[in-house]
Image (spheres, coloured by chain):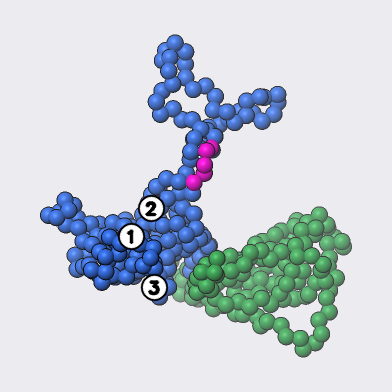
Amino acid sequence: MKKALIGRKIGMSQHIAEDGTMVPVTVCTLGPCVVVQKKTPEKDGYSALKLGFEDVPERKLTRPLLSDLKRKNIAPKRVLGEVEIFDESLDVGSVVTCEIFAENQVVTVTGITKGKGFTGAMKRHGFGGGRKTHGSDFHRAPGSIGAHTYPGEVWKGKKMPGRDGGGRVTVKNLKIVKVLKDRNIVLISGAIPGRKDSLITVKEK
Amino acid sequence: MNIIETVQKEIMPLDRPMNFEVGDTVKVHYRIVEGSRERIQVFEGIVIAINNKGVGKSFTVRRISYDVGVERVFPLYSARIARIEPIRKGKIRRAKLYFLRERTGKSARLKEKRVARGKAVAPVVEVPATHEAIPENQENENA
């Protein structure tokens, strides 16, 4: 069972390792998360922990959600998300903090990438494009998108310009550099998907 | 940004007050680790730039070595720098002294800035070694 937690990306910085090397790190707040619901195979068809993250004023939530949380004696939460059950002792109302992660632990981070809008084929799919100079009039266009009589159509899934970014992306094998327990902050080596302040899920490898 | 600044303060490996400015001539005592041993190498030159802030703050030192200009960038808060010794203050009018790269010989010098005696200067911070130096004979026994 893999430990997981919901959090937010704050931004990037550097960390000086003991041997003096500079490590690029992403600063993230992780948790504290409250267990809102424990899903079981008998009742829900699968098992999961529903976690709530970040306090929010009551007026921001819908009444059905609010009354559900009130019944369970949980303060209103902005974000709800499901993770695997990693600790059977966790019950509705128990709090999970970033202490579940340790330094040097390898984790997987999931987030929503920055939206790029409508982009060309060069940026979106890494097409080569044409020459900029020497009389070339073919610069950033995608080029040919198919043959002639056969196939007589453009193949489905052909890489073309379009909306890019803003999708769910998972990055594996990132290392936790530091855990600042009292601030609920975790430093993860390298870059993680998303803009600053975007929601992320960090999962143990 | 604010959270990042406080986090940076917390993870800073050491507190090294700035005891030099751009234009100063400094001696940087840099620790070089060779296997399990450590020695100190001194790099002396003019600070031509101070870059970034927070944990990533660094400075560039330029010197002319055997008629070849050599520049080294040091991270200010690295524990690998044993100490930074200011030698001479330079009289300068800009923050980045990249114009020195085009100059050689006499024109590549800076006028000295006279500082009133007794003026407070940040102390030289000595950072202790992380690796213990092994005496020669002991190492031979191991080998």
What shade does chain B have? green
Q: In this rendering, would A119 be left or right of B105?
A: left
Camera-nearest residue between A1 and B112: A1
Q: CA distance from mark 2 to mark 3?
A: 21 Å
* Residue appearing at x 19%, y 65% in the figure: A88
Which residue is label 2 attached to? A110
Camera-nearest residue between A4 and A134: A4
Q: Secondary structure at mark 2?
A: strand
Provide the chain ID for the residue under circle 1: A
Res. B114 image quadrant: bottom right
- Disc nearer the start of the sequence (1/2): 1
Q: Does residue A47 lie above or below A122 as drawn?
A: below
Q: Position of residue A191 (x, y in %)?
A: 47, 54
Q: Amino acid at mark 2?
A: Thr
Q: Are marks 3 and 1 in contact (CB under 8 Å)?
A: no
Q: Position of residue B47 (x, y in %)?
A: 72, 67
Res. A199 image quadrant: bottom left
Q: Secondary structure at mark 1?
A: loop
Q: Identify the chain drawn in blue.
A: A
Provide the chain ID for the residue under circle 2: A
* Residue appearing at x 45%, y 57% in the figure: A198
Extent of the magenta region? A115-119
Q: Quadrant of the C terminus of chain A?
A: bottom left
Which residue is label 1 attached to? A62
Q: How many marks?
A: 3
Mark 1 Cα shell of 10 Å, populated few (<14), some (14-19), many (≥20): few
Is residue A172 covered in magenta?
no
To the question of a shared chain for discs 1 and 2, the answer is yes
- Any part of residue A26 in sight: no
Which residue is label 3 attached to? A181
Q: CA distance from mark 1 to mark 2?
A: 27 Å
